[in-house]
Image (cartoon, rainbow, N blue to C red):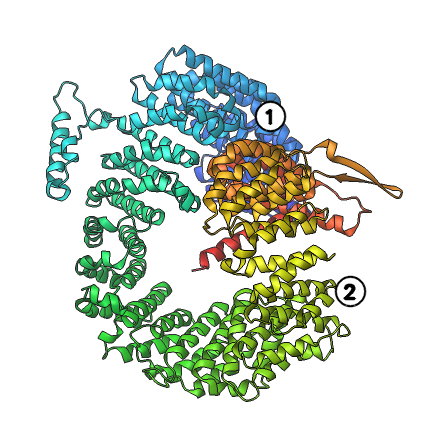
């Protein structure tokens, strides 16, 4: 410490030198010392350093002054509080000095000090005392200062301090307000602007009384309207307050908006601009409160969007249909008209420099953008009124305004895109005009407006056109098919134009690519001669991004119909373009010193366009090109892209001869299977599979793939067949199935080898299901038909079932038995001659066998019986009924499944037997499961004769007291209704009037099983009567209401069109079920302890699950603010409901950020409470785990909230952030979630 003090005293001595360089270097060294964490100053050193730095602020040399100011930052955090106060005092005094340079440097110094103070949320006493000291001096400087420059600096510092430390100055807010308000009438515009900034920061943290005073003052002054200049300022101030604290100004909008509307009609362009900007702010920040005024705002914006009093658009010419022929005449007449209008010497000596009307139009376009972006539910209205108005203004003469008009239309298109899931729903389409159909009808008008703009000189305008077209075809693929001839010349113009910027060419190519991908190829055939030269030129462009985009276009450019039917019907001949395309692509393919993206796209382009589609026209060039592919296959950077290209070439109908490279390529491909790159493995397996299919014996390119090559691949396969990656396993199994067809002789080495060991291990994996299981079954069927030695029917059967029958050990998971049974059934179907013997062997299984043998036997019987009629085995019924008496639940369940599946194979024999057993037996639950299997799997025609008898039997059991039985009955009733909906659905509806709550709950649950995500004949009938079933949400019985919510959730998830029109009546009941009801909470005594039971929890959980589903399917029909009220309540509810509402909050943050932002302060508090809750020390381990999971989920919601722009401005949120960063545990969770979300975003970007 002594050495540090000595060093600093040396520096202080040099700072007094007369040489400015000495002073500069000494100050620089002092700053370096102060930035070290280890430095500690004693009181004397502190005093000397502070005194010297303050003295240097008055130094004659500007560079020394600047360094001294920079020293203040680190100095503030190193010295004691009273020294900081000394610094602040001196700076405040200097700020009022007569010397301008000293005033400026002191202002910068004060900003530096304020920037270095700890945030308000840290509760630092230093920050509080410094801010209070500065505030008093600043308010007097603002109020009394005659020198405007001092006033401006003081206002600037005040705004900075309120922004950073506003929460510490609550006691000073009234005095700050009283000193700021008079400045709004200052004669200096700069003073007024800075006052508005300061007031904007003040309202973020001020108390309610101060806020009310400010708003009342603004309303009074606006009502008085003494002076147009100050009125403009008050409107600007209102807009600024709305931008900074929209959630607070909302309740005053009823008074504010009529005043702003009134001022819109005043003939003052600047005032109009500020009024419309205020509307934009209200629309974005107070979406709920502004809702009644949105039609007024739209009409004002539409009026002023065309407000151009100094320019005459000749409408007659505009509407002329001959766009191309008369375009130049139109341009000329417009220019001529405007020329005469604006001639100097006309009455008003008017010049374009005085024209402020463009600012009004720009404000109107931006306000419409805000309305369109925030009012999703008004889309149909926007397409009726806003869309045509915006399209008409694409001709706007002021470039900045035109860009905003385009941006507003882009926002409209983007709003239309998320809604497609329900708009394209076949039922929704019947409802008449939807946004998509309305947009479709306006496409000709849009194209007509864009056509002219595409020939404009302005680069910015043309970029906007390309962005518009790209978004349009993303929303409506195929919409431009009729308009391609009109658009292509405009695109070619931008590609050929020498003045075009690189970005414009990239946008033009990207737009062309998207249009080509989303429209049929024949629409472009007439334009290929015109498109090829500019695209080829772009492929040769020196800028890699242009080359890259051009290669993507080239892939789509010459799409030649390759199937025999279309070959004759389409006269398109690619021959004239082949040479150009090949030459430009091969040049890029050969180049080694080019960008990675260009390399990859050159490979793809050559593979797709040249080899795959045109390979038969290039017999001489093809072998050389394939050798380049072989080289690229050996390169680690390009190998993945090359494998994809080889797959496409191998699959081409042109049967490209790959023999020149296969001998070398297949071993390279085989080696890729051991690389630690999943995408490469998957693509390689796909490539090898297609090579086997198209290049093996029996094809025109006979035996291109030899057994030696196959052996090289087989050697690499065993590690790939594993439960660790099911997709890779599925691809490997598909390859083996293809191999069994093309090279059956190669399968001999599988017997007793590693591959079979891995296969058997995979069959026993509980993860084997879906596509991988289907691939496994296909492989076993393909394998057994090859009749390979050692891999016959009985050999494979022994491998599959041996471990179970040897009784060495039970398999760890029931799924393994199901998979083995499916494999046994697949083998049996492939070998019908040997099947009956196996079934006979299985039937011998008696009650003394182990449970695992009985389980496998019964499941195998079921799987085989599903496809084969087993009625020739008379003892089957007895065997299965005996199994119903087993002590093992799994055996009983398997017997139930087996009986149902066997009945599917022969309904007349087994279905009456099952129905009789249900009526007479006590084992209804198991038999009903069998019946469910029959109804789910049997054909409709086979079941129809039995519908009545099954229906009447089910109704007898729908009032059963056991919930499990009722659920099975409900599923059977629902699936049975699908067979004859016209008759059975009205019957179901009739049972809603049943006096039994059990019957009502069964009927409502049955409806859930009639809803699926695919179109069905029952849908129109269901749509008409689902409202009656949902009326059970008012049922007095808790359980009936719960199953009604579950059914509603299923409809909202699978087929939203069923319930969209009912939401107005259903939502109040849904929201009602989210409330905690005290009458449903009871205490249960468990020995010496009392345990609280909430009977309404399941009901609330079901209601919140419905709310979460509605966010995805019916967002446009929700009042988000009412929705948020219930989400807010859920944040304080039980563990399960908190978890759901955290998910909802994260979803809402991305779907409707402005609404969430308005409620942010109310949402932060419950999140903070969750994150800071401590579990009692003596709690069980599960309690700690639950609390940890809650914290993580809450933190995910916080991370999602922080993605909303301006969320950090909320004082409560910034305070919570500080709390998180100061708590080690919370900070660690927060950081890990942020990392996870950013890596997830990166992955989603990389999926291509």
Q: Residue furthest right?
A: 1088
Query: For the residue carrying disc 1, how many other residues have a C-alpha within 10 Å: few (<14), some (14-19), or many (20+)?
Result: many
Label 2 residue SS: loop
Please state the total of marks drawn on the protein image: 2
Identify the residue shown where x is 46% and y is 15%.
219
Instruction: Say above or below: 139 vs 967.
Output: above
Label 1 residue SS: helix
- In the visual, does 247 lie left or right of 505? right
Query: For the residue carrying disc 2, how many other residues have a C-alpha within 10 Å: few (<14), some (14-19), or many (20+)?
Result: few
Residue 628 x, y percent position in the rendering: 32, 76
Q: Which residue does the numbered mark 2 point to in the structure image?
A: 887
Q: Nearer the viewer, residue 288 or 490?
A: 288
Q: Nearer the viewer, residue 483 or 763?
A: 763
- For marks 1 and 2, the one nearer the N-term is 1
Residue 856 x, y percent position in the rendering: 67, 71
- In the visual, does 553 lie left or right of 764? left
- Residue 626 in which image quadrant: bottom left
- In the visual, does 671 lie left or right of 1236? left
Instruction: Say above or below: 33 vs 613.
Output: above
- Residue 423 in which image quadrant: top left
- Residue 1077 in which image quadrant: top right
Q: Which residue does the numbered mark 1 point to in the structure image?
A: 169
Q: CA distance from mark 1 to mark 2?
A: 75 Å
């Amino acid at each position: 410490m002594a050495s540090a003090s000595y060093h600093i005293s040396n520096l202080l001595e040099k700072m007094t030198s007369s040489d400015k360089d000495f002073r500069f270097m000494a100050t620089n060294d002092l700053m370096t010392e102060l930035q070290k964490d280890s430095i500690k100053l004693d009181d004397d050193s502190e005093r000397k350093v502070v005194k010297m730095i303050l003295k240097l602020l008055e130094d004659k040399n500007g560079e020394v002054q600047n360094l001294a100011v920079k020293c203040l930052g680190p100095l503030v955090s190193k010295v004691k509080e009273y020294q900081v106060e000394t610094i602040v005092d001196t700076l405040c005094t200097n700020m009022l000095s007569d010397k301008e340079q000293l005033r400026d440097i002191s202002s910068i110094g004060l900003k530096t000090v304020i920037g270095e103070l700890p945030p308000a949320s840290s509760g630092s006493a230093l920050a509080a005392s410094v801010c209070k000291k500065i505030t008093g001096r600043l308010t007097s400087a603002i109020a009394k200062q005659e020198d405007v420059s001092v006033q401006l600096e003081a206002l600037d510092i005040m705004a900075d301090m309120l922004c950073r430390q506003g929460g510490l100055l609550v006691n000073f807010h009234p005095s700050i307000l009283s000193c700021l308000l008079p400045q709004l009438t200052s004669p200096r515009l700069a003073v007024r602007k800075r006052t508005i900034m300061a007031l904007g920061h003040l309202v973020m943290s001020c108390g309610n009384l101060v806020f009310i005073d400010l708003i009342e003052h603004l309303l009074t002054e606006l009502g008085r309207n003494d002076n147009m200049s100050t009125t403009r300022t008050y409107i600007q101030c209102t807009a600024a307050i709305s931008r900074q604290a929209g959630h607070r100004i909302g309740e005053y909008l009823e008074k504010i908006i009529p005043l702003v509307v009134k001022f819109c009609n005043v003939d003052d362009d600047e005032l109009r601009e500020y009024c419309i900007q205020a509307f934009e702010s209200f629309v974005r920040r107070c979406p709920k409160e502004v809702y009644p005024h949105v039609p007024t705002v739209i009409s004002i914006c539409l009026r002023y969007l065309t407000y151009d009093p100094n320019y005459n658009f000749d409408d007659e010419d505009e509407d002329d249909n001959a766009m191309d022929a008369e375009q130049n005449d139109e341009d000329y007449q417009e220019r001529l008209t405007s020329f005469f209008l604006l001639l100097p010497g006309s009455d008003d000596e008017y010049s374009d420099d005085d024209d402020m009307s463009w600012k009004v139009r720009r404000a109107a376009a931006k306000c419409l953008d805000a309305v369109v972006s925030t009012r999703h539910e008004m889309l149909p209205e926007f397409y009726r009124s806003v869309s045509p108005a915006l399209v008409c203004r694409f001709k706007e003469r002021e470039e900045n305004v035109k860009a905003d008009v385009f941006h507003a239309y882009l926002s409209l298109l983007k709003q239309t895109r998320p809604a497609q899931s329900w708009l394209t729903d076949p039922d929704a389409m019947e409802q008449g005009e939807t946004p998509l159909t309305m947009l479709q009808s306006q496409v000709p008008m849009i194209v007509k407006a864009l056509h002219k703009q595409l020939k404009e000189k302005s680069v910015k305008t043309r970029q906007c056109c390309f962005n518009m077209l790209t978004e349009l075809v993303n929303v409506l693929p195929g919409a431009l098919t009729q308009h391609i001839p009109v658009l292509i010349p405009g695109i070619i113009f931008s590609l050929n134009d020498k003045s075009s910027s690189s970005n414009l060419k990239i946008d033009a190519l990207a737009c062309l690519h998207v249009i080509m991908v989303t429209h049929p190829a024949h629409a472009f055939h007439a334009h290929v001669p015109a498109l090829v030269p500019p695209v080829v030129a772009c492929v040769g462009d020196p800028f890699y991004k242009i080359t890259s985009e051009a290669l993507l276009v080239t892939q789509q450019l010459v799409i030649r119909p390759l199937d025999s039917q279309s070959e004759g019907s389409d006269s398109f001949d690619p021959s004239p373009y082949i040479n150009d395309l090949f030459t430009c692509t091969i040049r890029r393919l050969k180049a080694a010193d080019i960008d990675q993206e260009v390399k990859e796209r050159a490979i793809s382009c050559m593979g797709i366009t040249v080899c795959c589609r045109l390979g038969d026209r290039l017999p001489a060039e093809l072998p050389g090109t394939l050798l380049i592919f072989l080289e690229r296959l050996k390169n680690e950077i390009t190998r993945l892209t090359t494998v994809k290209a080889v797959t496409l070439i191998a699959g081409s109908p042109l049967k490209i001869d790959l023999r020149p490279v296969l001998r070398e390529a297949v071993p390279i491909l085989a080696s890729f299977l051991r690389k630690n790159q999943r995408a490469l493995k998957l693509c390689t397996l796909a490539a090898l599979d297609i090579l086997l299919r198209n290049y093996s014996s029996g094809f025109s390119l006979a035996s291109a793939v030899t057994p030696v090559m196959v052996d090289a691949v087989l050697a690499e396969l065993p590690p790939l067949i594993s439960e660790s990656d099911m997709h890779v396993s599925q691809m490997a199994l598909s390859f083996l199935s293809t191999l069994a067809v093309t090279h059956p002789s190669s399968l001999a080495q599988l017997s007793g080898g590693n591959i079979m060991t891995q296969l058997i291990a995979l069959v026993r994996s509980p993860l084997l299901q879906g596509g991988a299981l289907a691939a496994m079954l296909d492989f076993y069927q393909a394998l057994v038909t090859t009749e390979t030695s050692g891999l016959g029917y009985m050999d494979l059967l022994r491998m599959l079932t041996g471990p179970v029958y040897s009784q060495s050990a039970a398999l760890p998971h029931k799924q393994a038995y199901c998979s083995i049974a499916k494999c046994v059934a697949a083998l049996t179907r492939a070998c019908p001659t040997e099947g009956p013997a196996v079934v006979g062997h299985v039937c011998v299984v008696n009650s003394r066998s182990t449970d695992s043998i009985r389980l496998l036997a019964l499941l195998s019987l079921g799987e085989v019986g599903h496809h084969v009629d087993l009625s020739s085995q008379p003892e089957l019924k007895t065997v299965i009924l005996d199994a119903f008496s087993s002590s093992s639940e799994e055996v009983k369940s398997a017997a139930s499944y087996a009986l149902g599946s066997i009945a599917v194979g022969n309904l007349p024999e087994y279905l009456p037997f099952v129905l009789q057993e249900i009526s007479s037996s006590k084992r209804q639950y198991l038999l009903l499961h069998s019946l469910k299997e029959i109804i789910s799997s049997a054909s409709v025609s086979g079941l129809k004769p039995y519908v009545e008898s099954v229906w009447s039997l089910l109704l007898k059991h729908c009032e059963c007291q056991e919930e499990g039985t009722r659920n099975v009955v409900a599923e059977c009733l629902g699936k049975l209704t699908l067979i004859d909906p016209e008759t059975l659905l009205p019957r179901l509806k009739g049972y809603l009037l049943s006096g039994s709550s059990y019957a009502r709950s069964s009927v409502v649950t049955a409806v859930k099983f009639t809803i699926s995500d695919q179109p069905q004949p029952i849908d129109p009938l269901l749509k008409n009567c689902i409202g009656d079933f949902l009326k059970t949400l008012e049922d007095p019985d808790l359980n009936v209401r719960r199953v009604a919510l579950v059914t509603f959730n299923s409809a909202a998830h699978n087929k939203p069109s069923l319930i969209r029109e009912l939401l107005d009546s259903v939502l109040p009941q849904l929201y009602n079920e989210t409330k905690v009801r005290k009458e449903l909470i009871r205490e249960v005594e468990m020995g010496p302890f009392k345990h609280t039971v909430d009977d309404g929890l399941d009901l609330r959980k079901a209601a919140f699950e419905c709310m979460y589903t509605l966010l995805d399917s019916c967002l446009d029909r929700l009042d988000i603010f009412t929705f948020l009220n219930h989400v807010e309540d859920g944040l304080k509810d039980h563990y399960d409901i908190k978890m759901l509402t955290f998910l909802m909050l994260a979803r809402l943050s991305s779907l409707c950020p402005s609404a969430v932002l308005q409620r942010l302060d109310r949402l932060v508090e419950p999140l903070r409470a969750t994150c800071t809750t401590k579990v009692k020390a003596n709690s069980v381990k599960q309690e700690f785990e639950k609390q940890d999971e809650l914290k993580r989920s809450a933190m995910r919601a916080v991370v999602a909230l922080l993605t909303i722009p301006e969320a950090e401005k909320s004082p409560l949120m910034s305070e919570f952030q500080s709390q998180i960063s100061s708590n080690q545990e919370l900070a660690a969770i927060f950081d890990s979630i942020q990392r996870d979300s950013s890596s997830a975003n990166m992955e989603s970007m990389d999926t291509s």
